[in-house]
Amino acid sequence: MDARDFELDFHLDTPEVDDGLRLEAEDRLRRLATGHQDMIGASVATEHVAPYEYRARVVVYMRPENVTAEERNDSAETALRSAVHSIERQVRSQRERRREFWRRS
């Protein structure tokens, strides 16, 4: 997959998330998609849900089913980094399960 084919949508409603962190999340998601045909896009959202509580949600549009991670923390940056890290683990795990289809019972 070419990085230009990967659609990425950001909804950052928290001023605590700067351009550097947004670019870091974008880079990590694009690297996860590079060389694979299963990921077609992603959506990243952060919001301030309560005093001292932020929520970050990352959805990866993937074949055969989408993958979602949501993290809450008292820091928007930590919540976003944790959500991206969780998505990376889930996508790699899903790819591994598809690769080893013969092990299914």
Image: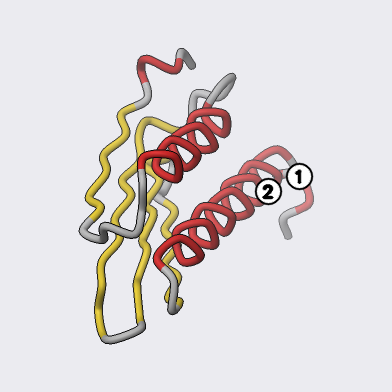
Front-most of residues 11 and 105? 11
State the mark number for residue 97.
2
Q: Secondary structure at mark 1?
A: helix
Q: Residue at left 26%, top 57%? A: 15
Front-most of residues 96 and 17? 17
Q: Nearer the viewer, mark 1 or mark 2?
A: 2
Q: Residue at left 32%, top 34%? A: 8
Front-most of residues 6 and 64? 6
Q: Residue at left 49%, top 24%? A: 37
| Quadrant in which residue 92 is drawn | top right
The amino acid sitting under disc 2 is: Arg
In the image: residue 80, left or right of residue 15: right
| Quadrant in which residue 68 is drawn | bottom left
The image's colour scheme reads secondary structure
State the mark number for residue 102.
1
Instruction: Using the image, determine if residue 100 lies above or below residue 90.
Output: above
Q: Residue at left 35%, top 34%? A: 41
Tag 2 or tag 1, which sits nearer the N-term?
Answer: 2
Mark 1 and mark 2: Cα distance apart in space: 9 Å
In the image: residue 36, left or right of residue 15: right
